[in-house]
Image (tube, rainbow, N blue to C red):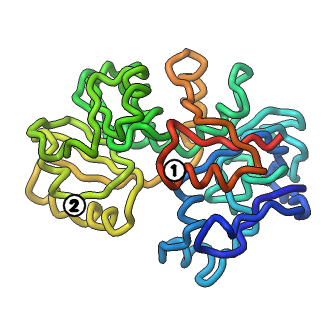
Amino acid sequence: MKAVVLKSYGGLDALEVRDVPPPTPKAGQVLVRVHAASVNDWDWEMVRGQSLVVRLLHGLFRPKVPVIGCDIAGRVAALGEGVKAFRVGDEVYGDLCMQGFGAFAHYACASEAGLAHKPAGMTFEQAAAIPQAGMLAVQGLIDVGQIRPRQRVLLNGAGGGVGTFALQIAKNLYDAEVTAVDRADKLDMLRALGADHVVDFRREDFTRSGRSYDLILDVKTDRAPWAYARALSPQGTYATVGGHIPRLLQTAIGGWLMSRWSTRRLRVVGLKPNKDLAYVNQLFEAGQLRPIIDRPYTLANIADAFRRFGAADHQGKIVITIG
C-alpha cells in the first residue's frame, strides 16, 4: 500500500510516499481502508521535530512512528478477533493519536473503541476533519470551559479546525456573543459562520483592549498567563487546547497559582480522543455543525498541505483525500 513515511525530523523533505506492507488488525482492532485523513498540530510538530516532548515520545534522534497521521475516515476492511461493534463495509472515522498513528496511508488499524460510525450524509472528507479538532472544541468549550447560554466568548486562532467548530457550537447551541480572533484574510469566513465580532490579531491585542470575556478558548497560547487573565471577567475561564509548549506549562502552573487567590480560572485541556464523536454526529445530523475544509489535497501533494498548515494559511481543516 502507499503510505506517508517520515524519514527524519526537521522539514518537509523528510516526508516520503512509499510502498509499505499493510497492517494486520490485532484482537480488538479494525482494519480501515482509509479514504480521507486530516492534518493536525501533532502531525506538524512531528515533521518539525523541534519539540523535546515529541522526540521523547516518538524517537529522540529519528522518528519511530512508521506512518504518521492521526485522523482517518474510511470503510472497515477486516476485523480483528473479538470485534463486535463493526462489520466489514461499515463507514467509520476516528483519531489514531493514542493508537500508533498511521492515518496517511491506504490502510490503518484502529481499536474498536477508537472509532465511530460515520453518518450516511457525511462525506469521508468531512468525517476526517472532525476527530481531533472536533473533540478539542467540544471538550474545551463544554467540559473545561463550562460554557453557558449567552456568555461572551472569545476564540483565539478561530480560523482553523478547532476554532471553526467551536464558533458553530458557541453560536448554534449556546447563543453566545462570539469574538473571533485571527488574520485579516480569515475574518470574512468567520463572519459568515456567525461571529458577532472579529479581530485581526496583527492590528489589535485583545488582551489589552479593555474588553472582558466569560470564556476564552485558545489554540495559540502565545502569551503569558496573566495577559489572558486580564481579558477575563471576574468569574471567567480561559481554556487552551494547544500552542507553544513553554506557554502551556506556564498556563498550567499559573492557573494553579491563580486558583489560590482569584475567581478567574486558567485551564489546559487534555484531549480525550474520540470521546464525543457520537455527540458530534448528532450535531451534524441536526444541521448545527459542519466541517469547514480548505482546498483539496492528495497523498501526491501532501508536502504542500503541510506547508500550508505550517504557514497557518488554511481556513478550517486541511484534509487529504487518499482514495
Task: Pinpoint residue 178: horizontal percent, then vertical percent.
Answer: 29, 27
Residue under the image location 43 percent in, 37 percent down:
159
Residue under the image location 17 percent in, 46 percent down:
207
Q: Nearer the viewer, residue 170 or 198?
A: 198
> Is residue 173 visible from the viewing direction of this image?
no
Task: Name the quadrant of the C terminus.
Answer: top right
SS of the residue under disc 1:
loop
Residue matched to label 1: 272
Which mark is drawn over residue 46?
none
SS of the residue under disc 2:
loop
> Is residue 181 visible from the viewing direction of this image?
yes
Residue under the image location 35 percent in, 36 percent down:
184
Q: Earlier in the sequence, mark 1 or mark 2?
A: 2
| Residue 20 relative to residue 279: left or right | right
In which quadrant of the rendered view does residue 147 lie? top left
Task: Pinpoint residue 279: horizontal percent, then vertical percent.
Answer: 54, 30
- Residue sticking out furthest to the top: 286
Which mark is drawn over residue 224?
2
Task: Pinpoint residue 75: horizontal percent, then vertical percent.
Answer: 83, 37
